[in-house]
Image (cartoon, helix red, strand yellow):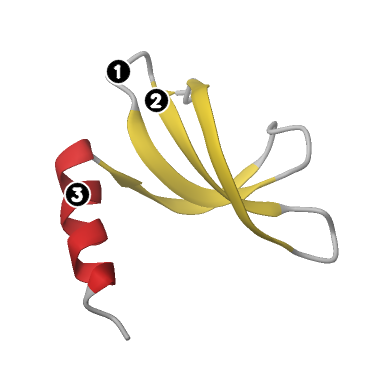
Amino acid sequence: MAISYEIIKHIAVLSENASGWKNELNLVSWNNREPKYDLRDWSDNHEKMGKGLTLSKEEVDELKQALQLIE
């Protein structure tokens, strides 16, 4: 079964490695579902991806609060 995805909104590039893959934060719809925040490595043309982390809006809000506690 093929996984379909659509990058709804590009938010940020956090880093880029020597081979050109970028660690990106995007809003992505997976398999035509509600878009979620997605953090993962992508090839330059977004045809290939690495393993990543997908978060709901509520989870992003919790993460934001937690990150503010880090000095």
Residue under pointer 3: 61
User: Closer to the camera: disc 2 or disc 3?
Assistant: 3
Residue under pointer 1: 33
Disc on the earlier residue, 3 or 1: 1
Q: Are marks 2 and 1 in contact (CB under 8 Å)?
A: yes
Q: Amino acid at mark 2?
A: Trp
Residue 59 is situated, as x and y percent measured from the top left of the image, at: 18, 49
Q: Amino acid at mark 3?
A: Asp
Residue displayed at 68% across by 33% down: 46
Residue 38 is situated, as x and y percent measured from the top left of the image, at: 42, 42
Residue 47 is situated, as x and y percent measured from the top left of the image, at: 70, 31
Of residue 13 and residue 22, the one placed in the foreground of this image is: 13
User: Is residue 44 rendered to the left or right of residue 4?
Assistant: right
Residue displayed at 69% across by 52% down: 22
Q: Is residue 24 above or below residue 48?
A: below
Of residue 66 and residue 20, the one placed in the foreground of this image is: 66
Q: Is residue 52 above or below residue 71?
A: above
Q: CA distance from mark 2 to mark 1?
A: 6 Å
Residue displayed at 39% across by 25% down: 30
Q: Residue 30: give its label.
A: 2
| Mark 2 crowdedness (10 Å alpha carbons): few <14, some 14-19, many ≥20 | some
User: Is residue 66 rendered to the left or right of residue 19?
Assistant: left
User: Is residue 49 rendered to the left or right of residue 39?
Assistant: right
Of residue 28 and residue 64, the one placed in the foreground of this image is: 64
Secondary structure category for the residue under label 3: helix
Q: Amino acid at mark 1?
A: Arg
Q: CA distance from mark 2 to mark 3?
A: 20 Å
